Image: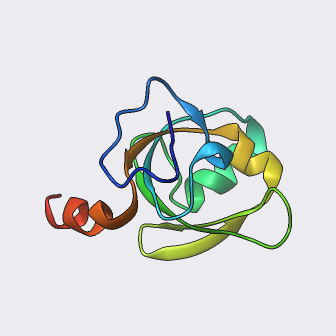
Amino acid sequence: MFTPGNQNPVKAQGPCCLLDAPAGSVVRVSNVQVEGGMRGRLCALGITPGCEMEISSECSCQGTRKITVRNSSLVLNEPMARAIECECVCQGRNRNRHRNNR
């Protein structure tokens, strides 16, 4: 599925949670598995099924992820990151080429 050393576009075998994606990769949200207020907050931040986001880095706090979605940088805590199912679009150096092809 995700291999940190792989620098080529990757077709994921199925959705995985946001925490499984390596830093520097671009992922597409396939599902948001939360209800109520948390789902509304994620939608308001632009995290909806079908949107693409870049995994900027792993933060120093265990389980948190810094992401860039729709030109905004966000940090998600572990429960929110775990609730987001995604598929890898591309990793590493090829992500700039992917952006130019959109």
Farthest-out residue, front = 5
Q: Residue at x 36, y 55 (%)?
A: 7
Q: Residue at x 52, y 52 (%)?
A: 4
Instruction: Decide which of 17, 29 is in the foreground and name it.
Output: 17
At which x and y percent is residue 27?
A: 44, 49
Instruction: Decide which of 39, 93 is in the foreground and name it.
Output: 93
- The colour scheme used to paint the residues is rainbow
Q: Quadrant of residue 75?
A: bottom right
Q: Residue at x 56, y 54 (%)?
A: 22
Above or below: residue 27 compared with residue 67: above
Q: Residue at x 24, y 65 (%)?
A: 99
Q: Is residue 51 left or right of residue 61?
A: left
Farthest-out residue, top = 13
At which x and y percent is residue 92?
A: 39, 62
Q: Quadrant of residue 20?
A: top right
Instruction: Decide which of 28, 8 is in the foreground and name it.
Output: 8
At which x and y percent is residue 5?
A: 48, 53
At which x and y percent is residue 96?
A: 26, 69
